[in-house]
Image (tube, grey):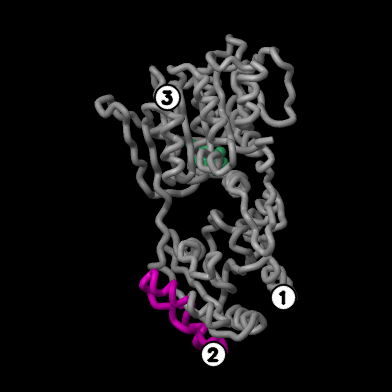
Amino acid sequence: PGDKSSTSRLFTCDSCIVEDKAAQSLLNKIIHTSLVNTTNQVEVLQRDPNSPLYSVKTFEELRLKEELLKGVYSMGFNRPSKIQENALPMMLAEPPQNLIAQSQSGTGKTAAFALAMLSHVNPAKKWTQCLCISPTYELALQTGKVIEQMGKYYPEVKLAYAIRGNKLDRGMKLQEQIVIGTPGTVLDWCSKLKIIDPKKISVFVLDEADVMIATQGHQDQSIRIQRMLPKECQMLLFSATFEDSVWKFAERVVPDPNIIKLKREEETLDTIKQYYVLCSDKEEKFTALCNIYGAITIAQAMIFCHTRKTAGWLAAELTKEGHVVALLSGEMTVEQRAAVIERFREGKEKVLVTTNVCSRGIDVEQVSVVINFDLPMDKDGNADNETYLHRIGRTGRFGKRGLAVNMIDSKHSMNILNQIEDHFNKKINKLDTDDLDEIEKISN
Ligand SMILES: Nc1ncnc2c1ncn2[C@@H]1O[C@H](COP(=O)(O)OP(=O)(O)OP(=O)(O)O)[C@@H](O)[C@H]1O
């Protein structure tokens, strides 16, 4: 029953859409087919500050089993990612060290602990030695896939999934050395059904800790599992974000940890030209948008709308005008959304119309223009500055100059715009979209 919330769809409540954190996380996993770029430095906090700080630049230095090194290279990995440089030596050290690691999605965490689990397993022993818990069924499957790929040349090591629907009889002993699953089922297998002997676990991984604690009941189940493990069991915890609540949870689950953090790339408005356009309704906003498209060349644009209805309408209008439009909408499954984002990334569509909930947490870096067809606001109707920065901040990354246009159609939206100006202490200039010459100027 604890897995009910683990569906990858979205829930609709009145006019708002409550996004499942797990769905976002899954979406990020699916669309990150390669490492995310980062120029930030890894922060390392060692439990024992006197022991030397190892970091590796190659996989060879880790003295992995031949079978695993082959597996790593077969996945196209040439060298460890930033976080792996530090995390892998700690995870593979003798005696084993505990680790709490935080870095955004796509930086190589899953690959790191998959490798650690595979390295620690003794294939001659036919019982479960490594246990990994994930917040949802889908996330567990996704992680399992990575372990399977990496262990491709190491077929003696077997993997089992402790997820709903996978029914096993009480008292039977699991022979698979690695088990990955959701907290409820894993807890059942360890306690009620006694399929796994928790005392024989030597590596425990808790993945997506931030998503985990957002789900009712998962936190307690995770702690109950952890309490059954032997003291010398290696404990590893991973999270994409690190709020206080995650931190408190991590400290309960991982005793004496080493800590590794990799900050997100800063988002900035410094390299972005920001404008606003005055309109009276959504039809006028659409006309203004067409005028902008008529005056300047736009490689790729993202257009944000407040509701699903507006997004659908706008996508249809743009299509009528001959644009090739991609639409991200709330009723789509994670897989459908991943496919839309992938197509947009490949440049198959030049315009992406989306509501905010659908696009949160997604990095599409090649966008040159962002249009706020509706301004971002919180549930009280105030400016949502963080979302504004996240929408716009992506256009000016990696040395490119971005362009952002805000559509204003009421006193309220003007008010939000003013709040945003105040918050970032940057003036947003007015643009007259009836004046083609003026629009042309902004693209220079
Ligand atoms: N050392 C590496 N070299 C090249 N690619 C890598 C390396 N490590 C991981 N990758 C690839 O980068 C992508 C992201 O890695 P991974 O899934 O491990 O990151 P993550 O931090 O766990 O993110 P998420 O939580 O979203 O899964 C994957 O496609 C993975 O195959």
Decide whether residue 175 is among the magenta residues: no
Q: Which residue corresponds to mark 1?
A: 317
Residue at image location 58% in from the left, 9% down from the top: 124
Residue at image location 52% in from the left, 83% down from the top: 439
Query: Residue 435 — which label?
Result: 2
> How busy is the neighbourhood of tag 3: few (under 14 within 10 Å), some, or many (20 plus)?
some
- Of all residues shown, which one is farthest toward the top? 124
Q: Is disc 3 placed on a helix, strand or loop? A: helix
- Say which label, 1 or 3, has the lower sequence index: 3
Residue at image location 32% in from the left, 35% down from the top: 45
Residue 203 is situated, as x and y percent measured from the top left of the image, at 50, 22
Residue 11 is situated, as x and y percent measured from the top left of the image, at 68, 53
Q: Which residues are magenta?
A: 417-444
Per the model, the C-alpha gap separating discs 1 and 3 is 56 Å
Numbered disc in front, either 1 or 3: 1
Task: Indicate the amino acid at tag 1.
Answer: Glu
- Say which label, 2 or 3, has the lower sequence index: 3
Numbered disc in front, either 1 or 2: 1
Check the picture and name the quadrant holding the N terminus. top right
Task: Decide: is 263 above or below 350.
Answer: above
Q: Which residue corresponds to mark 3?
A: 62
Task: Indicate the amino acid at tag 2.
Answer: Asp
